[in-house]
Image (cartoon, grey):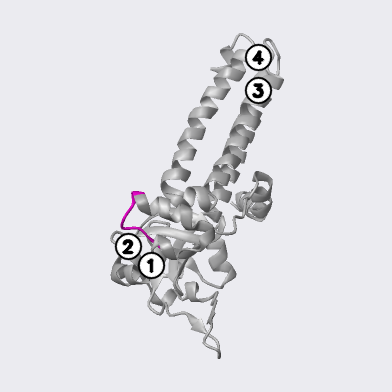
C-alpha cells in the first residue's frame, strides 16, 4: 500500500494508519489482559504503553517519511528494512512489558503487594513450580499466615518474604470474610490521603482500605471485600517513573530477548 503512495507525506499517513491499528491491538492486550484495573495506571502498564507507542510511531512512520521518494531504486528494500525494524522493536518492547507485568497481587502481613516474574526470580521462586501461579495472570492471592511480624517490644515489623510464602498461597476469593475484617474505613486512612479516601468511599459505600505496594509506590488499596475487586489505589509516596527510567529498568530484559532470538 505504501509503495503506491504519490509522495512521502501520503506514505507517512498510510504507515501512520497501519501503525495506529497495530498499536491499538497491542494496547488492548496491555490494558485488558496484562495490567487490568488499577494495575494499569499504578503498576507500570501506562509506562509500558508509552514505550510501545514511542517505538511504533517513531520507528515506523517517521522513518518512512525520511526515506520515501517516488522512483527511488532502493525504495522497496528501504521500506522492507523499516518494517522489519519496527516489528523487531515492537516485539522487544512487548517482551519487556510482558516480563515486568505483575504475575500476582498477594495479600500478606495485612498488605497487598504486586509481584512480577522477575521479582519472584530475585527471591528464588520458580513461577512454573508454584501451582497457585499456573493460571491467568495477574492472579490475586493471600497467604494462610498473614499475621504481622513483631519485634521484642511488640512493634509491627515489615516482613519482605511473607508475600513470597508460595506454599501457603490461596485465591483471594477464598478469604473475603478475613479481608473484610482486616480492612479500614476511610476515616482511619492517614490524614494525608483521608480526603481522597472519603471521596472514593462516598461513591462506593462498601469499600475498605488496605496498605499496598505497587509500581507507583506504597499507599492504600481501595477494595470491595464482598467481591475482592480493587476500586482504586492511593499512593502515599508516589514514585513517578519516566519513560526513560522505565526503559532503563528493563534494558536487561530487552537484551535477554535479543539473545533468545539468536539462540533459536
Labels 4, 2: front one: 2
Q: Nearer the viewer, mark 2 or mark 3?
A: 2
For disc 3, the marked residue is 64
Residue range in magenta is 203-209
* Label ID, residue 8: 4
Query: Depth check: 228 or 59 in front?
Result: 228
Q: Secondary structure at mark 4?
A: helix
Q: Which residue is mark 1?
A: 183
Q: Could you tell me residue 203's position as x and y percent?
A: 35, 49
What's the distance in space between the residues labelled 1 and 3, CA to CA?
54 Å
Residue behind mark 2: 225
Q: Earlier in the sequence, mark 4 or mark 2?
A: 4
Q: Secondary structure at mark 1?
A: loop
* Few, some or many residues within 10 Å of mark 4 (<14, 14–19, 20+): some
Q: How much space separates mark 4 and mark 2, taking CA atoms?
A: 56 Å
Between residue 160 and residue 14, name the one nearer to us. 160
Mark 4 or mark 1: whose residue is earlier in sequence: 4
At 56% across and 67% down in the image, what residue appears? 121
User: Do the numbered discs 4 and 3 sit on residues whose CB atoms are within 8 Å?
Assistant: yes
Task: Assess whether mark 2 and mark 4 are in contact (beta carbons under 8 angstroms).
Answer: no
- Residue 112 picture location, percent across and down: 46, 65
* Residue 205 magenta-highlighted: yes
Amino acid at each position: 500500500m505504501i509503495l503506491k503512495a504519490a509522495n512521502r507525506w501520503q506514505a507517512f499517513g498510510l504507515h501512520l494508519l497501519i501503525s495506529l491499528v497495530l498499536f491499538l491491538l497491542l494496547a488492548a492486550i496491555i490494558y485488558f489482559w496484562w495490567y487490568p484495573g488499577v494495575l494499569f495506571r499504578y503498576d507500570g502498564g501506562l509506562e509500558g504503553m508509552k514505550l510501545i507507542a514511542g517505538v511504533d510511531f517513531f520507528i515506523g512512520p517517521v522513518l518512512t517519511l525520511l526515506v520515501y521518494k517516488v522512483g527511488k531504486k532502493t525504495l522497496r528494500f528501504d521500506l522492507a528494512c523499516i518494517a522489519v525494524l519496527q516489528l523487531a522493536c515492537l516485539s522487544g518492547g512487548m517482551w519487556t512489558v510482558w516480563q515486568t507485568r505483575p504475575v500476582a497481587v498477594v495479600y500478606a502481613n495485612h498488605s497487598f503487594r504486586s509481584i512480577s516474574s522477575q521479582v519472584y526470580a530475585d527471591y528464588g521462586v520458580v513461577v512454573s513450580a508454584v501451582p497457585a501461579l499456573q493460571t491467568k495472570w495477574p492472579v490475586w492471592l493471600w497467604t494462610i499466615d498473614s499475621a504481622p511480624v513483631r519485634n521484642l517490644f511488640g512493634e509491627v515489623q515489615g516482613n519482605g518474604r511473607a508475600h513470597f510464602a508460595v506454599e501457603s498461597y490461596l485465591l483471594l476469593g477464598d478469604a473475603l470474610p478475613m479481608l473484610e475484617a482486616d480492612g479500614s474505613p476511610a476515616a482511619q486512612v492517614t490524614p494525608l490521603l483521608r480526603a481522597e479516601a472519603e471521596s472514593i468511599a462516598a461513591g462506593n459505600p462498601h469499600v475498605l482500605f488496605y496498605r499496598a505496594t505497587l509500581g507507583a509506590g506504597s499507599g492504600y488499596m481501595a477494595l470491595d471485600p464482598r467481591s475482592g475487586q480493587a476500586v482504586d489505589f492511593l499512593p502515599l509516596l508516589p514514585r513517578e517513573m519516566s519513560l526513560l527510567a522505565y526503559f532503563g529498568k528493563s534494558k536487561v530484559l530487552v537484551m535477554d530477548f535479543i539473545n533468545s532470538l539468536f539462540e533459536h
